[in-house]
Image (cartoon, rainbow, N blue to C red):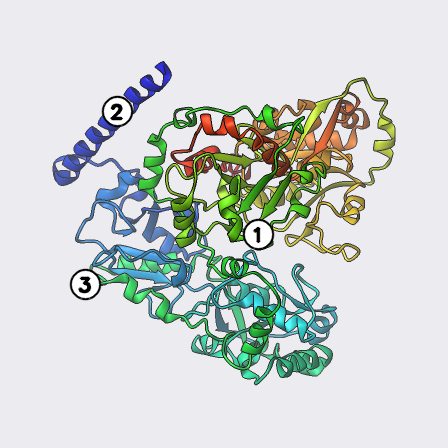
């Protein structure tokens, strides 16, 4: 209690101090002419653009001008430093307003992901992919070749050995039903893989919504880098952008799916017909305007001319400009595609399952104000009335009561069933059952929400209204906070079930335990089995912690890393290299000495199966970004190599190369195997513990608890995604 009181007093002091700083700042701003403003000489005479928000978590800095012309670089400076406010020439979003400069709304997503209802007369300019933006920032564009655009058609045709690819990060249901349409095409005989790159002739380039001018890198980069023919839903969006009709195939050109699939099959098997879809390459080339940050170059030029150009008023209602009326997601539901949808509805899926699968996936990004608020909320210890020890649920009780758990969400779009989620504890299935049947909600002993499938809305309101005392609502999370959008109201969640060691129900991907006696391990056999240097398997190339950039730098400095999956090459002998349970993947990795175990984000206790399996049956040395996360989980220091152990990138590389060549040094990283063993877990292991934890209903009733703000508990505050940057920029 003393700690709580002290922290409360400290928070009030902090709040008062911040208020004082704000008052002084406003005074200085209002009287800026009377106070000197110090700027580095390199900024004198430049147009300063203040970026008031990050870009999907990344800072917007002057690096965004890296590929602009030298004239633009000399003209303009982009900063997210609030001290530049008095001298800024434009704002990208939201600080105390200066009426003489334009406020710019930047949007790379379609209107279904925009939150603009409260911004009346706020923005002066728009910077989006749309052609009618004040500053157009498209994902790509076509420009005519200045000379001859020679194309080696023989080489292009010979490089294609497979039919079609759909490479997508959001495989869930979307408003325009692209997943359903892709499944329909597969049923009609179109061969579609869900991974891979170069060998494919076609790429499924269905956007997540069909909106005005919304054509993303899925279309442009696959056509440019991998020389695939994009397959799109409707032609009008692409024709409006001036894209040649012969560059892509549009489903809506055909009267039925059968005719469409027949056409694609014909083109796939006919060299002449296929190469007709590449003739445009003789006249045009694709410019990756998104990668080149074209929009920022244009913005700088426009701001520089702002004083000489007529002033433009603000948008009366930005929502009227960037709203869902500019979209048409009805294509799949229209004849003749409705027949497929009706067939699916007769397939026996439950009403609730269909309802959940069709909800939108919204990415919720914390604003600056929310971020500040989160930093002032109470700690977890202050939020909880009582902490229930997880040890109570670690073993099967001697006497058991029947338990019913209601799963209020699906699991990445799939059903949550007793058979699958309690498979590792068959004894528990005798007294514990998982259901998604809404009629059993009233008789359930707990309600579980999988954070990645949580959509809130009316269903959550109903569940909150109907909840009964002693029935814990449980947040289940396998993902790090960097990939989380779970934002329930306060005091809705009672327990957490995650990989974190401080979760109410612990569900780790793996852990280590001491052996009861020393094991005899043939270390020499490990060395003999290694014929390759290092490997990395991944489906997500571009992450918040910039892991891919560091991996590429390691390779560029002479250390061989073979990359498999969406970020590299495919293993023809395996049915998908991202399946960590696959025996094929095990055999694929075994010959390597090292495994790159960079997680997609660096967050508290977030160590996934890739690390644990690299240690166990694959007999490799994992390379990780930061030692802290593994040390906190009790992993021996000598079991892995951490990048942040080294002061510089050069020191890290020197050590890595030395271990690779020195047998004695390499095998020191395997000595731990004699005294420790790895226990491979899964995200499902928590369900067995949850069943046992629910046995003591009397204790649960007498010791209620809830999280005031579980979103804060599982938030960006628990992550540090800047670790790799030190070594990337060195």
- What residue is shown at x 22% (from left), y 26% (from top)? 16
Residue 645 visible somewhere in the drawing: no
Give me the C-alpha separation between circle 1 and circle 3: 49 Å
Residue 623, image x, y percentages: 66, 34
- What residue is shown at x 20% (from left), y 48% (from top)? 97
Tell me which label, 2 or 1, sits earlier in the chain.
2
Tell me, yes or no, whether the two marked residues, 2 and 1, touch with CB atoms within 8 Å.
no
Mark 3 sits on what residue?
311
Residue 398, image x, y percentages: 67, 26
Tell me which label, 1 or 3, sits earlier in the chain.
3
Disc 1 packing (10 Å; few <14; some 14–19; many ≥20): some
Give me the C-alpha separation between circle 2 and circle 3: 44 Å
Circle count: 3
Label 3 element class? loop
- What residue is shown at x 60% (from left), y 36% (from top)? 691
Q: The N terminus is located in which quarter?
A: top left
Residue 113, image x, y percentages: 40, 58
- What residue is shown at x 32% (from left), y 59% (from top)? 301
Tell me which label, 2 or 3, sits earlier in the chain.
2
Viewer-proximal residue, 44 or 477?
Answer: 477
Residue 629, image x, y percentages: 57, 29
Residue 157 visible somewhere in the drawing: yes
Label 1 element class? loop
Mark 2 sits on what residue?
12
Mark 1 or mark 3: which is in front?
1
Which residue lies most toward the top here? Answer: 2
On residue 117, which mark appears? none
Mark 1 sits on what residue?
412
Tell me, yes or no, whether the two marked residues, 2 and 3, touch with CB atoms within 8 Å.
no
Disc 2 packing (10 Å; few <14; some 14–19; many ≥20): few
């Amino acid at each position: 209690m003393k700690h709580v009181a002290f922290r409360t007093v400290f928070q009030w002091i902090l709040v008062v101090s911040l208020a004082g700083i704000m008052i002084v700042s406003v005074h200085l701003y209002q009287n800026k002419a009377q106070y000197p403003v110090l700027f580095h000489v390199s900024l004198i005479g430049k147009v300063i653009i203040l970026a008031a928000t990050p870009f999907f978590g990344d800072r917007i800095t002057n690096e965004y001008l890296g590929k602009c012309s030298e004239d633009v670089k000399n003209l303009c400076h982009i900063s997210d430093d609030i001290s530049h406010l008095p001298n800024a020439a434009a704002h990208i979003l939201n600080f105390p307003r200066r009426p003489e400069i334009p406020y710019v709304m930047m949007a790379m997503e379609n209107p279904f992901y925009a939150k603009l209802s409260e911004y009346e007369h706020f923005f002066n300019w728009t910077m989006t992919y749309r052609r009618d933006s004040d500053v157009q920032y498209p994902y790509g564009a076509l420009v005519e070749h200045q000379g001859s655009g020679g194309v080696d058609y023989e080489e292009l045709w010979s490089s294609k050995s497979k039919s079609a690819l759909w490479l997508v990060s959001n495989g869930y249901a979307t408003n325009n039903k692209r997943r359903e349409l892709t499944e329909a095409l597969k049923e009609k005989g179109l061969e579609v893989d869900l991974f891979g790159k170069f060998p494919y002739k076609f790429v499924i380039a269905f956007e997540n919504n069909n909106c005005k001018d919304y054509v993303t890198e899925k279309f442009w980069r696959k056509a440019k880098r991998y020389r695939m023919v994009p397959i799109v839903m409707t032609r009008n969006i692409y024709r409006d952008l001036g894209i040649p009709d012969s560059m892509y195939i549009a489903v809506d050109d055909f009267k039925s799916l059968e005719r469409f699939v027949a056409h694609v099959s014909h083109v796939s098997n006919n060299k002449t017909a296929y190469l007709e879809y590449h003739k445009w390459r003789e006249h045009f080339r694709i410019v990756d305007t998104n990668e080149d940050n074209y929009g920022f170059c244009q913005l700088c030029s426009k701001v520089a001319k702002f004083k000489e150009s007529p002033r433009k008023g603000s948008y009366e209602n930005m929502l009227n400009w960037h709203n869902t009326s500019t979209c048409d997601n009805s294509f799949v539901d229209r004849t003749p595609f409705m027949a497929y949808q009706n067939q699916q509805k007769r397939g026996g899926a439950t009403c609730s399952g269909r309802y959940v699968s069709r909800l939108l996936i919204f990415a919720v990004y914390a604003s600056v104000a929310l971020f500040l608020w989160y930093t002032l909320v109470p700690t977890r210890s202050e939020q909880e009335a009582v902490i229930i020890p997880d040890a109570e649920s670690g073993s099967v009780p001697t006497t058991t009561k029947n338990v019913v758990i209601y799963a209020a969400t699906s699991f990445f779009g799939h059903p949550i069933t007793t058979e699958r989620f309690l498979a590792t504890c068959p004894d528990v299935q005798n007294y514990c059952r998982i259901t998604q049947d809404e009629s059993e909600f009233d008789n359930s002993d707990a309600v579980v929400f999988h954070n990645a499938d949580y959509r809130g809305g009316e269903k959550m309101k109903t569940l909150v209204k109907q909840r009964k005392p002693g029935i814990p609502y449980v947040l289940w999370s396998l993902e790090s906070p960097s990939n989380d959008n779970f934002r329930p109201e306060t005091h809705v969640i009672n327990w957490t079930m995650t990989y974190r060691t401080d979760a109410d129900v612990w569900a780790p991907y793996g852990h280590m335990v001491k052996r009861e006696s020393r094991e005899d391990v043939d270390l020499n056999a490990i060395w003999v089995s290694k014929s390759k240097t290092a490997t990395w398997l991944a489906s997500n190339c571009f992450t918040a912690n910039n892991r891919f950039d560091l991996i590429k730098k390691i390779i560029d400095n002479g250390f061989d890393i073979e990359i498999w999956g969406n970020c590299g090459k495919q293993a023809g002998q395996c049915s998908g290299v991202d399946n960590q349970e696959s025996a094929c993947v095990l055999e694929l990795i075994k010959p390597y000495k090292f495994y790159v175990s960079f997680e997609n984000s660096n967050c508290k206790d977030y160590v996934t199966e890739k690390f644990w399996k690299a240690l166990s049956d694959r007999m490799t040395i994992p390379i990780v970004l930061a030692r802290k996360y593994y040390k906190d989980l009790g992993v021996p220091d000598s079991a892995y190599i951490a990048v942040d152990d080294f002061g510089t990138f050069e020191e890290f590389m020197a050590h890595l190369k030395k271990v690779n060549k020195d047998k004695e040094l390499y095998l020191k990283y395997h000595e731990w195997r004699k005294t420790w063993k790895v226990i491979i877990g899964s995200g499902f292991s928590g369900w067995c513990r949850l069943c046992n934890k629910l046995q003591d209903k009397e204790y649960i009733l007498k010791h209620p608890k809830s999280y005031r703000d579980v979103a804060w508990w599982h938030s960006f505050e628990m992550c540090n995604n800047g670790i790799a940057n030190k070594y990337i920029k060195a």
